[in-house]
Image: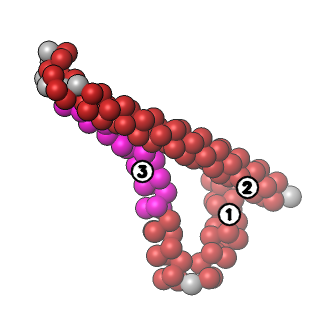
Amino acid sequence: GWGMETQSKINGLAWTVLAMANSTENALTLISDEMRQLRDAVIQNRLVLDMLTAERGGVCKMLGISCCFNILDYCDNIREPERTDNLWAGWVMSLWGGWMYWIIQTVLPIVMIGMLILFCLP
Protein backbone atom coordinates (compact mmCIF):
# COMPACT_ATOMS: atom_id res chain seq x y z
CA GLY A 1 0.00 0.00 0.00
CA TRP A 2 0.88 3.59 0.56
CA GLY A 3 3.33 2.85 3.40
CA MET A 4 5.32 0.35 1.37
CA GLU A 5 5.46 2.72 -1.59
CA THR A 6 6.72 5.51 0.66
CA GLN A 7 9.30 3.22 2.25
CA SER A 8 10.44 2.16 -1.20
CA LYS A 9 10.88 5.79 -2.25
CA ILE A 10 12.77 6.61 0.95
CA ASN A 11 15.05 3.61 0.39
CA GLY A 12 15.59 4.75 -3.20
CA LEU A 13 16.56 8.22 -2.02
CA ALA A 14 18.87 6.76 0.61
CA TRP A 15 20.64 4.64 -2.02
CA THR A 16 20.93 7.66 -4.33
CA VAL A 17 22.50 9.76 -1.57
CA LEU A 18 24.85 6.90 -0.68
CA ALA A 19 25.89 6.50 -4.33
CA MET A 20 26.54 10.25 -4.58
CA ALA A 21 28.59 10.17 -1.37
CA ASN A 22 30.66 7.28 -2.71
CA SER A 23 31.23 9.07 -6.02
CA THR A 24 32.26 12.22 -4.17
CA GLU A 25 34.68 10.29 -1.96
CA ASN A 26 36.19 8.58 -5.01
CA ALA A 27 36.63 11.94 -6.77
CA LEU A 28 38.20 13.51 -3.68
CA THR A 29 40.52 10.52 -3.29
CA LEU A 30 41.74 10.95 -6.87
CA ILE A 31 42.25 14.68 -6.33
CA SER A 32 44.06 13.94 -3.07
CA ASP A 33 46.41 11.51 -4.81
CA GLU A 34 47.10 14.05 -7.54
CA MET A 35 47.79 16.78 -4.97
CA ARG A 36 50.26 14.54 -3.12
CA GLN A 37 52.11 13.85 -6.37
CA LEU A 38 52.20 17.59 -7.17
CA ARG A 39 53.37 18.37 -3.64
CA ASP A 40 56.21 15.83 -3.97
CA ALA A 41 57.23 17.27 -7.35
CA VAL A 42 57.24 20.84 -6.00
CA ILE A 43 59.34 19.85 -3.00
CA GLN A 44 61.79 17.97 -5.23
CA ASN A 45 62.06 20.97 -7.57
CA ARG A 46 62.64 23.31 -4.64
CA LEU A 47 65.34 21.01 -3.29
CA VAL A 48 67.14 21.03 -6.63
CA LEU A 49 66.83 24.83 -6.90
CA ASP A 50 68.29 25.24 -3.42
CA MET A 51 71.16 22.88 -4.28
CA LEU A 52 71.89 24.72 -7.54
CA THR A 53 71.80 28.14 -5.89
CA ALA A 54 73.50 27.19 -2.60
CA GLU A 55 76.78 28.94 -3.53
CA ARG A 56 74.88 32.22 -3.91
CA GLY A 57 72.85 31.85 -0.69
CA GLY A 58 69.87 29.91 -1.98
CA VAL A 59 66.69 30.80 -3.81
CA CYS A 60 65.36 33.23 -1.19
CA LYS A 61 68.57 35.28 -1.06
CA MET A 62 68.76 35.42 -4.85
CA LEU A 63 65.17 36.66 -5.00
CA GLY A 64 65.85 39.13 -2.21
CA ILE A 65 63.00 37.94 -0.03
CA SER A 66 62.57 36.16 3.25
CA CYS A 67 60.78 32.91 2.54
CA CYS A 68 59.63 29.88 4.39
CA PHE A 69 58.73 26.85 2.33
CA ASN A 70 55.83 24.82 3.67
CA ILE A 71 53.07 22.95 1.84
CA LEU A 72 50.31 21.82 4.18
CA ASP A 73 48.57 18.47 3.63
CA TYR A 74 44.88 18.38 4.59
CA CYS A 75 44.01 15.40 2.40
CA ASP A 76 43.49 13.02 5.32
CA ASN A 77 40.79 15.32 6.76
CA ILE A 78 38.50 14.29 3.90
CA ARG A 79 37.99 10.82 5.36
CA GLU A 80 37.98 11.79 9.06
CA PRO A 81 34.18 12.27 9.44
CA GLU A 82 33.63 8.83 7.89
CA ARG A 83 36.01 7.23 10.39
CA THR A 84 34.18 8.86 13.29
CA ASP A 85 30.78 7.71 12.01
CA ASN A 86 32.05 4.16 11.51
CA LEU A 87 33.52 4.06 15.02
CA TRP A 88 30.20 5.16 16.53
CA ALA A 89 28.17 2.73 14.43
CA GLY A 90 30.55 -0.11 15.31
CA TRP A 91 30.26 0.69 19.01
CA VAL A 92 26.45 0.72 18.86
CA MET A 93 26.33 -2.55 16.91
CA SER A 94 28.74 -4.25 19.31
CA LEU A 95 26.73 -3.02 22.29
CA TRP A 96 23.37 -4.39 21.17
CA GLY A 97 24.42 -7.09 18.74
CA GLY A 98 22.92 -8.12 15.40
CA TRP A 99 19.31 -7.49 16.36
CA MET A 100 20.01 -3.73 16.42
CA TYR A 101 20.73 -3.84 12.70
CA TRP A 102 17.40 -5.60 12.14
CA ILE A 103 15.57 -2.93 14.18
CA ILE A 104 17.20 -0.09 12.30
CA GLN A 105 16.53 -1.64 8.89
CA THR A 106 13.02 -3.00 9.50
CA VAL A 107 11.22 -1.58 12.50
CA LEU A 108 12.44 2.02 12.37
CA PRO A 109 11.09 2.77 8.85
CA ILE A 110 7.72 1.26 9.79
CA VAL A 111 7.56 3.37 12.97
CA MET A 112 8.53 6.50 11.02
CA ILE A 113 5.83 5.88 8.41
CA GLY A 114 3.28 5.22 11.16
CA MET A 115 4.16 8.49 12.88
CA LEU A 116 3.97 10.34 9.57
CA ILE A 117 0.48 8.94 8.96
CA LEU A 118 -0.66 9.82 12.50
CA PHE A 119 0.56 13.40 12.23
CA CYS A 120 -0.83 13.93 8.74
CA LEU A 121 -4.34 12.61 9.43
CA PRO A 122 -6.86 15.16 10.77
The N terminus lies in quadrant: bottom right
- Where does label 2 land, which residue? 11
- Decide which of tag 1 and tag 3 comes sooner along the chain: 3
Are circles 2 and 1 on residues that touch, CB within 8 Å? yes
In the rendered image, which quarter is residue 3 located in? Answer: bottom right
Residue at the limit of the structure toward the top, as seen here: 64
The mark closer to the camera, 2 or 1, is 2
* SS at circle 3: helix
Give the spatial CA distance, label 3 vs label 2: 30 Å
Q: In this image, 1 relative to 73: left or right? A: right
Q: Which residue in the protein does label 3 denote?
A: 76
Q: Is residue 50 visible?
A: yes
Label 2 element class: helix
Looking at the image, which residue is at 46% across and 76% down?
91
Location of residue 72 (image quadrant): top left
Type of amino acid under label 2: Asn
What residue range appears in magenta?
Answer: 67-85
> In front: 81, or 34?
34
Residue 70: give x, y in percent of width and height: 26, 36
